[in-house]
Image (tube, rainbow, N blue to C red):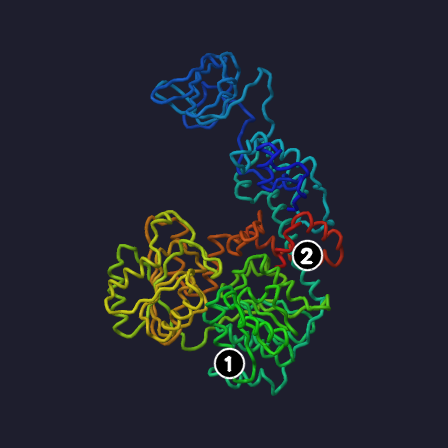
Amino acid sequence: MPRMPSPTTSPAAKSGPARALETLGLNTPIALALHLPLRYEDETSLTPLAQARPGDTLQIEAVVQDARVELRPRRQLVVRLVDDVGETLVLRFVNFYPSHQKTLQPGARIRARGELRGGFFGREMVHPQFKAVQPDTPLAAVLTPVYPTTAALPQAYLRKAVASGLLRANLGEVLPAGVVPAGLPPLREALLFLHHPPPNTALATVEDHSHPAWQRLKFEELLAQQLAQAQSRRERALLAAPVLVARPDGLHAQLLATLPFRLTGAQQRVTHEIAADLGLGRPMHRLLQGDVGAGKTVVAALAAAVAIDAGWQCALMAPTEILAEQHFAKLVQWLQPLGVQVAWLTGSKRGKARDRALAAVASGEAALVVGTHAVIQGDVQFARLGLAVVDEQHRFGVAQRLALRRKLQLPGERQTEPHLLMMTATPIPRTLAMTYFADLEVSTIDELPPGRTPIVTKLIADNRRDELIARIRDEIAQGKQIYWVCPLIEAAEDTGEAPAKPARGKPMAELRNATETHAQLSAALSGVEVGLIHGRLKPAEKAAVMARFKAGELAVLVATTVIEVGVDVPNASLMVVEHAERFGLAQLHQLRGRVGRGEVASVCVLMYSTPLSDSGKQRLRAMAETNDGFEIARRDLEIRGPGEFMGARQSGDALLRFADLAEDAPLLAQARRQASWLLDRHPQAAQAHVTRWLGHQLDYLKA
């Protein structure tokens, strides 16, 4: 939702609840109107104490007969009530404030709501909600909402704020007749119902979001998202881009002829799709997705060859130095013998070496530039950038992706952009492709190159650690190599590492770290070279360790998730992931993909500690049941939801608050159909709808 500009009143001058509203982003009428209840309380009726049964949650009305603070068995406020026919009830408060005692004075008429218990001394409620009333105080006519809030924001204050927002927000209909699916209520009516349902409402339909009022909100949100993506696609179609066409006997053809392998059918198909886009004269905005090891790098190299063949530069950006270096090594191997100069730019490259690389990029001498986010820093100037390739694009923060888009604007030609190819080894489920990637063309490599051996995945508890180390000795004796991955405890910003998420089980302080495991394995595997790599090592040190492992000088490599992507050692046959329950599905699938890269039979061992959370069990079960990255992605979306799957927390905003992509595919399909029609026939209504729902999020959706 759009946010109001900072108010003139300083935050320090505001009351606690007012500051809490701002913290929750509830500082506009529309934001308040869309802050929906978590649940509801029924204060529309009273239950006579004579009819009340233990275990029921109910509301009673009675008069305070006595109120006192008891010190045993612990300090508590005990209030005895008596109703109009002489039935009694005790209210018990272990935590109480002077305001409780002031309200609960003898003689005060009270309405209390809570769970009735049958105590040793009779019926009682523990910590009920209560308020003072008069004998003629009317009952609530609708259910009482209970909103998501914080300790500094009482429900009573928030209810008043939301009610005010509902009155002030512009909730009038902006969509033409026929756009909203039949049977759904107007927006204002839907919101009023969801905030204050009548007593006879079937709450099950509200709680499972199947009620027409919920369906209206979901459709509105999905339509706004589809409109924004369709607008982005149309705006890009109006821009110009270099026309990049490969010559019949040029670099593209030479690269194909010299590759030491044949492209798979899927690689050939996506290569043609990309080449067709590059020759259209408008900016390509394409996502290339393929499972781990599907061969995306060579597709990117062939796209780069088309750009270079046409006299333009290409930049390839990766989130970590290890992944960038892996790309660099392959691209140099393939393209340098064909006369292409490849520049290397990372944050660790400094001094004269960096100056020389910058000069080569600025002059156009370096036709291909490979690196990390250093590629988009301010001092990097391209002579003729025609194509940008971003690998593992979801691992870049929103700010970095926006910076890349601005960097792509060609100097002096405001309406001209280079082509953009994004790559990911985290396949995108179809519903996500229809929403968050609706403004992209998607190419899919759905076929692995020949020679890749299936990876067997095994789950073992951490109490079998000694058995596993014995297995490692056998693997080493056969000349095999092993990865042993530990969860990261401290983040290392420059490497792209991130801490494994805490889950139920051992606290972070008790997790085995890479340094400890390296020492343990070195002692247990006497005479075996065990390497260690993690995010705190300097780039040169990491490169030296990886070089030794690739050369076979190290039999075991203990690592953090710094080796999650880009590492290619065909002789590695065993991957051990310690505390696997702490890792996300996408991470586990990427780590598993570090083995099985040659003809050697490979195993991935996921070692877990108990107790396992429900989501931890689901993730490990999914890994054991399938090697298919697309199925892994589908299950990951089910477990985490689209916000986390897409890294929406990087922006601080959940991109879909109400719709559920797993359940609302029919609504999504309708929204998708209506978006194009609205943009064609009613562009002003389309813009009003997008502004109401997305506001400041538009840049994030386009990043």
Q: Earlier in the sequence, mark 1 or mark 2?
A: 1
Crowd class of label 1 (few under 14; some 14 to 19; many from 20; radius 10 Å): some
Q: What residue is at 76 percent from the left and 52 percent from the top? A: 684
- x, y percent for residue 514: 35, 59
Q: Is residue 314 visible?
A: yes
Q: Work out which residue is located at the far front of the displayed protein and give it.
A: 352
Q: Mark 2 sits on what residue? A: 675
Q: Amino acid at mark 1?
A: Trp
Q: Is residue 390 above or below residue 658?
A: below
Q: Is residue 373 left or right of residue 80?
A: right
Q: Amino acid at mark 2?
A: Ala
Crowd class of label 2 (few under 14; some 14 to 19; many from 20; radius 10 Å): many
Q: Nearer the viewer, residue 120 or 281?
A: 281
Q: What residue is at 55 percent from the left and 51 percent from the top? A: 660
Indicate which label's residue lies in the foreground, 1 or 2.
Answer: 1
- x, y percent for residue 559: 37, 63
**How far apart in space, not on screen, are marks 1 and 2 (Cα)?**
44 Å
- x, y percent for residue 331: 51, 77
**Please, what secondary structure does the residue beneath circle 1 have?**
helix
What mark, if any, has residue 66 been given in the picture?
none
Q: Nearer the viewer, residue 44 or 627?
A: 627
Q: Is residue 626 left or right of residue 652?
A: left
Q: Is residue 295 left or right of residue 181?
A: left
Q: Mark 1 sits on what residue? A: 334
Q: Nearer the viewer, residue 74 or 332?
A: 332
Q: Work out which residue is located at the far bottom of the displayed protein and give it.
A: 249
**Please, what secondary structure does the residue beneath circle 2 have?**
helix
Q: Is residue 218 above or below residue 255?
A: above
Quarter holding residue 33:
top right
Image quadrant for the C terminus? bottom right
Quarter holding residue 156:
top right
- x, y percent for residue 522: 27, 64
